[in-house]
Image: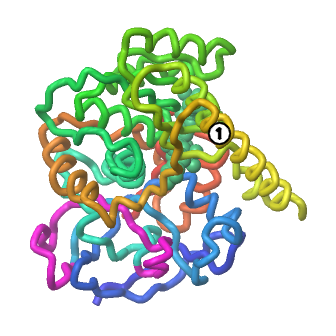
Amino acid sequence: MPTNAAAWIKAANAKLEVGPAPYTPPAADQIVVRNRAVAINPLEWIIQGAGSLTYRWLAYPTVLGSDVAGEVVEVGSAVTRFRVGDRVLGHAVGTDKDSNRAAEGGFQLYPALLERMAAPIPDTLAFEDAAVLPLAVSTAACGLFQSDQLGLRHPSVNGGPTGQTLLVWGGSTSVGSNAIQLAVAAGYEVIATASPRNFDYVRSLGAAQVFDYSSPDVVADVVAAFTGRTLAGAIAFGTTAAASCIRIVGACQGNKFVSIATPPVSFAQLAEPDRGRLALPKLIARLVASNVALQIGARRRGIRTKYIFGTTLKANEVCTLIYRDFLPTALAGGHYRAVPEPTVAGHGLSDIQHALDVQRKGVSAAKIVVTLP
Ligand SMILES: NC(=O)c1ccc[n+]([C@@H]2O[C@H](COP(=O)([O-])OP(=O)(O)OC[C@H]3O[C@@H](n4cnc5c(N)ncnc54)[C@H](OP(=O)(O)O)[C@@H]3O)[C@@H](O)[C@H]2O)c1
């Protein structure tokens, strides 16, 4: 049996600590991989800093981590799509309430993954490139394709245009980069926002027009760009995203729906070592007040909104649509890019805490990755 190790989190607000971990064989619908690269998401430092607020159910000690790429070492009894030795990427869901198992966390050498949340990767794609995709793809797909969210037409490598235009606020974020690619593959024109330094990058993903989200005129400029276009809805990344999208969508014709990935308040300060005793209650108060303001603004304009939870696809048809039908073919055929490109912040489980701190301090069109040789 392989010798496993993990970057454990032993309690809410604790730093990660590397130590031995049991090797857990896969359940019937799981695969176990030898992890070769993990990518870092805001989710992990948000749980670390605000675990008592956001993921109250977590059974500590546990293992965080969502983005995994490696080789399959064992398959569950019901798995037919993968064989030992296959190179895969996967979205680990160990912190979900219905999993809540250290064995399914990404930050270990041998995580157990749901077979349906994994996809084969082409030989041309390095593990550190593949690792940038899973959680960002899942989150974008939940917002774009679930029937309780925007419910857009599904992506394919040869679909025709829908004649509708989607607003992606935060197109240079990791999730936004994937939302643009998925929406374009589904036949939507995309209007996006980003910092000017990332305009070319966002256009290279397929966005037709890009606007600076920091400009005082951005709402008016985006509304003007939608003149004569049919809105497919908006998907919102970044703390200012939801409020701006609500104002824009209210002034456009079409699907008045905003899928929201980011709450209107940043959690970054909660992960600071010297955050102070009142940081959490103050954040909760600001969160409640901002959400109430968002809801009032949306209702006044006849707009529906919904928060995305980036693993809900595991329980609906969007999961097989992405991980079985679309992504493997699109990656193998060069129709889909593994972006934002990785910035490798370390090699080994002991570098993951440093990588979390780097991600929390802010990235721009980049994904922080740690390789696991
Ligand atoms: N609800 C969920 O299930 C879920 C899942 C995943 C992520 N998220 C959230 O979705 C957001 C994106 O996650 P990520 O990992 O993709 O982020 P990320 O890559 O770490 O985000 C970095 C990017 O954020 C952009 N940005 C910063 N402030 C912005 C603003 N006000 N408006 C638009 N863009 C802004 C920056 O763009 P420039 O460099 O161009 O300025 C930068 O490229 C985060 O808030 C994250 O917490 C939610």
Does the residue tagged 1 have its C-beta within 8 Å of any atom of ligand 1? Answer: yes
From the image, tell me which residue sits under label 1.
239
Q: Is residue 40 among the parts visible in the rendering?
A: no
Decide: is 275 above or below 28. Answer: above
Q: In the image, 213: left or right of 134? A: right
Decide: is 127 above or below 70. Answer: above
* Residue stretch in magenta: 74-103
Q: Quadrant of residue 31?
A: bottom left
At which x and y percent is residue 256? 46, 32
Decide: is 272 above or below 101. Answer: above
For the point 63% across and 41% down, the residue is 362
The reply to whether the magenta stretch includes residue 86 is yes
Q: Quadrant of residue 108?
A: bottom left
Quadrant for the N terminus, please: bottom left
Quadrant for the C terminus, please: bottom left
Q: Nearer the viewer, residue 3 or 332?
A: 332
Name the image colouring: rainbow
Q: In the image, 368: left or right of 119? A: right
At which x and y percent is residue 155? 22, 39
Amino acid type indicated by mark 1: Thr
Q: Is residue 333 among the parts visible in the rendering?
A: yes
**What secondary structure predominates along the stretch shown in magenta?**
loop
Per the image, label 1 sits on a secondary structure element best described as: loop
At which x and y percent is residue 135? 41, 54
For the point 62% across and 64% down, the residue is 47
For the point 14% across and 36% down, the residue is 157
Q: Residues within 10 Å of mark 1 (few under 14, many from 20)?
A: some
Q: Nearer the viewer, residue 72 or 299?
A: 299
Q: Nearer the viewer, residue 238 or 154?
A: 154
Decide: is 326 above or below 246. Answer: below
For the point 66% across and 69% down, the residue is 51
